[in-house]
Image (cartoon, rainbow, N blue to C red):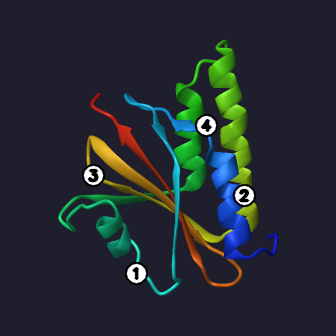
């Protein structure tokens, strides 16, 4: 793990997430948030997404989330191929700099997706996006 502090990580994560879209029935950008390390997850994520705690919450691995995205992308499409490289860079960055990386999916067909982890100085970092999966 690379030792870095929250402001550095937030800045670099925002740069790496810029122009990357989560592919589903609607392509959604990523947004970066931070919170103090005392926030209880996933309860805090319900508040962040304006959802109620009665909405379903599923925890999946980061590799599972990105594997599904890479599977959806067409190998012969240069734009989607470039997106795949950006996804890999983003995933590697998250794994290298954050501790306890977890992925939470809130909702059913219209999901709020949160990738969470903590920095070496105890700051909680959240990378958020949305997905629509009706099939």
Q: Are marks 1 and 3 in contact (CB under 8 Å)?
A: no
Which residue, given by chain and number where applicable, does mark 1 sit on? Answer: 40
Q: Which mark is drawn over residue 107? A: 3
What is the C-alpha distance between the residues marked 2 and 1? 25 Å
The x, y position of residue 28, in whole percent, is 45, 38
* Neighbours of disc 4 within 10 Å: few (<14), some (14-19), many (20+): few
Q: Secondary structure at mark 3?
A: loop
N-terminal of the pair, mark 3 or mark 2, is: 2
* Closer to viewer: mark 2 or mark 1: 2
Separation of residues labelled 3 and 2 (CA atoms): 29 Å
For marks 2 and 1, the one nearer the N-term is 2
Residue farthest to the top, as pictured: 76
First in sequence: mark 4 vs mark 1: 4
Across and down, in percent, residue 61 comes to 54, 56
Residue 114's label in the rendered image is none
The crowd level at tag 1 (other Cα within 10 Å; few <14, some 14-19, many 20+) is few
Residue 92 drawn at (x, y percent): 73, 52
Residue at the limit of the structure toward the right, as seen here:
2
Q: Of the residues tagged 3 and 2, which is closer to the observer?
A: 2
Q: Provide the secondary structure element on which disc 2 rests.
A: helix
Task: Tell me the CA gap for discs 3 and 4.
Answer: 25 Å
Q: Which residue is mark 2?
A: 12
The answer to which image quadrant residue 56 occupies is bottom left
For the point 51% across and 82% down, the residue is 36
Eyeballing the image, is 116 above or below 18?
A: below
Quadrant of the rendered structure where residue 88 is? top right
Instruction: Tell whether label 1 touches label 2 (CB within 8 Å).
Output: no
Q: Mark 4 = which residue?
A: 19
Indicate which disc, 1 or 3, sits on the residue closer to the N terminus.
1
Asked whether disc 4 touches disc 2, contact meaning CB atoms under 8 Å apart, the reply is no
Q: Are marks 3 and 4 in contact (CB under 8 Å)?
A: no
Q: Nearer the viewer, mark 3 or mark 4?
A: 4
């Amino acid at each position: 793990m690379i030792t870095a502090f929250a402001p550095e990580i937030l800045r670099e994560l925002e740069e790496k997430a810029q122009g990357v879209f989560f592919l589903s029935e609607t392509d959604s950008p990523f947004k970066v948030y931070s919170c103090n390390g005392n926030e209880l997850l996933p309860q805090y994520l319900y508040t962040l997404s304006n959802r109620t705690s009665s909405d379903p919450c599923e925890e999946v691995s980061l590799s599972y989330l990105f594997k599904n995205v890479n599977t959806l992308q067409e190998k012969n499409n240069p734009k989607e191929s470039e997106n795949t490289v950006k996804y890999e860079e983003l995933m590697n960055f998250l794994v290298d700099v954050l501790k306890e990386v977890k992925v939470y999916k809130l909702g059913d067909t219209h999901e709020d997706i949160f990738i969470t982890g903590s920095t070496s100085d105890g700051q909680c970092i959240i990378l958020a996006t949305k997905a629509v999966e009706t099939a």
